[in-house]
Amino acid sequence: MPKHELILLKNMMQPGYTGSLPDYEKTGGYQALRTTLGKIAPADVTAMVKKSGLRGRGGAGFPTGVKWGFLPKDYHGPRYLCCNADESEPGTFKDRQLMERDPHQVLEGILLACYAIGAETAYIYIRGEMVLGSQILEHAIAEARAAGYIGTNILGTGVHVDIWVHRGAGAYICGEETALLESLEGKRGLPRVKPPFPATHGLYNKPTVVNNVETLANLPHIINRGPEWFAAIGSPPKSTGTRVFCVSGHVKRPGNYEVPMGVTVRELVYEHAGGMRSDKPIKAFIPGGASAPFLTPAHLDVKLDFEHVAAAGSMLGSGGVTVMEEGTSMVWAALRLMEFFYHESCGKCSPCREGSSWLVQTLRRILAKRGRMQDLETLLDLCKNIAGRTVCAFGDAEVAPIQSTLKYWRQEYVDLISEAEAANLIQLEPAGRH
Amino acid sequence: MKLAEKYKDEIGDILSRYPVKRSALIPLLYVAQRDQGYVTEAAMQEIAALLRLTPPQVYETITFYTMFNLKPVGKFHLQVCKSLMCALVGSDTVIGWIKAKLGIAPGETTADGLFSLSAVECLAACGTGPMMQVNDDYYEQLTEDKLDRILSDLRSTGTSPLKSGPFMWPEPITVKSET
């Protein structure tokens, strides 16, 4: 069993740790803030984060320091930081644990990011369903405000930062950063056309950074222990640090496991998550949330870092690893995810709005043994006309389950359709009609 | 009574958090929903006036978000996650249990107005499925016995000690022995 150090989950693993301010301070909490505010120049904080190699933990994996560096340097009006806590990617449940068990670690990260980018206001956009999480954060903010870590003139350094919790209201798309900004402005959560990017035209059209909860929670540790320390963890040079992988599906012990980036799925499933629940072999897994294409047992030794997962034809995404055992119907699995995407398509772009509905209907028909062979071409054709043709990455995400299951388990589709055709249950319509 | 009078301090606090009034829309809709269990047309009109929006601007926003009820729902809104990760570990079975026990299908409310059932998409509890949200609370790792206890608790006391607290899974002791 590989020994490794926990970073983000370390505090909460201590017996009796409640996540209160005194508990957090006892573990060295807010030390990074004390050593940074007024002592390290904001530009140097950004440089440290760049040097650490920290990349976004929300899904896209963009280098955090580089993202901060896009803010205009000569702009003197308000700037904003938005903490993306709209954790909604199926398969992902790490931010919920980070916020509910160690909220001050997230708050300290937010304060450090605000200092680096010169923001005096931060909004934590938390998904609406996480009522408990929002209450815990509100309480932690009140504690930190009373102790002088949040508000005006923090620790007597002249730095001002206010942090507010803003609850979403049940829309997956609001995890997309520009949809999040629209939603925070009190509108429908429709992604914006980019450019301009949030770095110049974000919340209220002001320079804005949107960072994921886990990304921000890493910041105090990078400051305390140095960017070189962080950059040596994981799979350097491009995938540094740990990831909190969320393991779900047919494993014995699903849950959040923090491991250095670059461990394999095999290690994650068999050494951490206790192996498969019925000791059946793995049939398929998703390495990075519902938006990531399915992979096969042939990929069990792929390293879980940004580059290796991408090279294997999928993506590390949000770190949600869902494992399926032998016997799971891949057509059914693809349909379940497709129903999610159909439900959550915001409706802004026609290819995604209409295409998701067609994909669901076609999959349902195949699964109900009413399919026909040309449905397979229809599916692929639809996927081709959705991906890359929408304002946001949702279009690319929604075709992933279908394209990847058709790539690796095409025979399952063919078998269902062959059964339907043999039974001759329906009068086939001419090809090309809908 | 108008929301602005009944929740004067809370609304003032909400408005003070944003430099642009419209940002307070979703928070104020939550206040309205908490007051009546759903958002009434009168509440939408009042909120529109408070934020200097037109009623259609409020309506177009509220209809985008699934968490707002535009008509009354049962006192306990059982929302069972049906996304793939929960489906792999038995969420369809949970929906079947509820159907059998309460006699309602997703989208329906019991005759006594106590329970509504919805099948919903991912609630970020994929490692602890099957699960459901009841009003503000999560209930995870559901079994039939657990479901019976929850329904009985809800009927008798309005809540249940089986609801999730601050989330961590697996719990430390498990991880410690394994890593």
Image (tube, grey):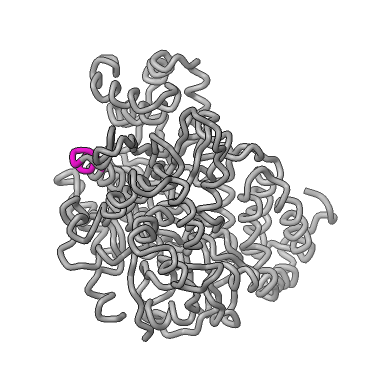
**In this orientation, which residue lies closer to the viewer: A24 or B130?**
A24
- Residue A5 image position (x, y, % from top left): 33, 74
Compared to A374, does B41 lie above or below?
Answer: above
- Front one among B125 and A419: B125
In the picture, measured across the screen, residue A369 lies left or right of residue A275, that is: right
Horizontally, residue A201 falls left or right of residue B144, namely: right
Q: Which residues are magenta?
A: A141-147
Position in image of residue A301 (x %, y %)? 54, 82
- Residue B101 appears in view: yes
In the rendered view of the protein, which quadrant contains the N terminus of chain A? bottom left
Magenta span contains residue A275 = no
Q: Main secondary structure of the magenta part?
A: helix
Task: Based on the picture, tell me whether residue A144 belongs to the magenta stretch.
Answer: yes
Q: Quadrant of residue A408?
A: bottom right
Q: Residue B152: x and y, percent?
A: 19, 52
Task: Give above or below for B55 relative to B108.
Answer: above
B55 lies above or below A322: above
